[in-house]
Image (cartoon, rainbow, N blue to C red):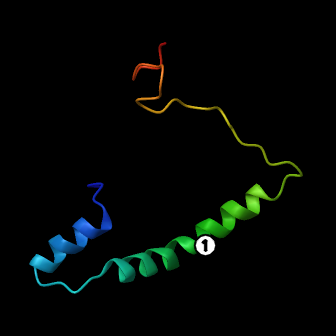
Amino acid sequence: MDGLPLNRLESILKRYGSEVTRTSQIVRLSTHCQPLIHLLREHQHSDPLIQMDETRIQALKEPGYSATGNK
């Protein structure tokens, strides 16, 4: 909900005396999310064709372009 990176969350919890590490958080999260990941993969592989959008986006500070994408 707060959108904190794991290293920042680990530091906050450590200040309060917790020994929760990034690794233990990821392992715990992965075990809870694994059934969802399997369902998504099963759904993805149920069709004979997999498509993806390969539309290029412009990165900021690309040579010859402004940050808005206009030349």
Q: Position of residue 10 (x, y in %)?
A: 24, 74
Q: Quadrant of residue 56?
A: top right
Q: Which residue is mark 1?
A: 35
The residue under the point 10% across, 78% down is 16
The residue under the point 47% across, 33% down is 59
Report whether 55 appears left or right of 29. Answer: right
The residue under the point 44% across, 74% down is 29
Q: Position of residue 20 (x, y in %)?
A: 26, 83
- Where is 14 relative to 60, above or below? below
| SS label for mark 1 | helix
Q: Residue furthest top?
A: 71
Report whether 60 appears left or right of 44. Answer: left
The residue under the point 53% across, 70% down is 33
Q: Position of residue 32 (x, y in %)?
A: 49, 75
Q: Position of residue 42 (x, y in %)?
A: 75, 64
- Where is 67 relative to 11, above or below? above
